[in-house]
């Protein structure tokens, strides 16, 4: 059975590295001083990972905006944002909100404020198909 601090470390490790530490991880048998060192090291990694994710989000948002700009250019003027989003999602099949979220996820922006706003916007733009059971 893990102590509260060991459960916290397990959660922190998962948030940082994407998986829980094994039961044989050094943290569980370390001295309090070594546990603090491991915690601090994991914290440094967590900060670096958050920054890497923030930069990846910014690149994905820039790529998405560039794609939208190309669509506006191809339209030759007069196209609305709704028109452009409809063209961008043309050829996709949407059955429910999860499909819309998946489309935004594939753009790499679902977990950004802009991505969440885009999901709401697309919910009023895309055409939903009826789900057919075999």
Image (cartoon, rainbow, N blue to C red):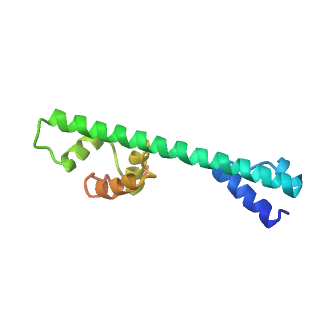
Q: Nearer the viewer, residue 25 or 30?
A: 30
Q: Position of residue 74 (x, y in %)?
A: 17, 33
Q: Nearer the viewer, residue 134 or 116?
A: 116
Q: Position of residue 94 (x, y in %)?
A: 35, 49
User: In this orientation, does residue 103 appear?
Assistant: yes
| Quadrant location of the N terminus in the rendered image | bottom right
Instruction: Name the residue: 75% across, 53% down.
Output: 39
Considering only vertical position in the picture, is 119 above or below 60? below
Please indicate whether residue 108 sits to the left or right of residue 127 in the image.
Answer: right
User: In this orientation, does residue 18 appear?
Assistant: no
Instruction: Name the residue: 34% across, 57% down.
Output: 117
Please indicate whether residue 80 sits to the left or right of residue 32 in the image.
Answer: left
Farthest residue toward the bottom? 4
Q: Position of residue 16 (x, y in %)?
A: 65, 49
Picture mark count: 0
Tell me which corner region of the image, top left, top right, bottom left or bottom right, holds residue 49: top right
Please indicate whether residue 86 sits to the left or right of residue 93 in the image.
Answer: left
Instruction: Name the residue: 79% across, 55% down.
Output: 36
Instruction: Name the residue: 88% across, 52% down.
Output: 30
Considering only vertical position in the picture, is 66 above or below 125? above
Please indicate whether residue 36 sits to the left or right of residue 107 in the image.
Answer: right
Q: Nearer the viewer, residue 35 or 71?
A: 35
Q: Position of residue 120 (x, y in %)?
A: 33, 59
């Amino acid at each position: 059975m893990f102590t509260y601090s060991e459960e916290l470390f397990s959660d922190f490790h998962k948030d940082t590295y994407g998986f829980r530490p094994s039961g044989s991880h050094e943290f569980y048998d370390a001295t309090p001083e070594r546990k603090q060192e491991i915690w601090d090291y994991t914290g440094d990694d967590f900060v670096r990972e958050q920054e890497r994710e923030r930069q990846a989000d910014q690149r994905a948002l820039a790529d998405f905006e560039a794609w939208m700009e190309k669509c506006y250019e191809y339209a030759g003027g007069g196209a609305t944002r709704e028109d452009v989003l409809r063209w961008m999602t043309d050829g996709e099949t949407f059955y429910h909100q999860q499909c819309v979220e998946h489309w935004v996820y594939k753009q790499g922006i679902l977990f950004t404020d802009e991505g969440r706003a885009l999901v709401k916007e697309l919910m009023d733009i895309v055409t939903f198909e009826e789900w057919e059971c075999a």
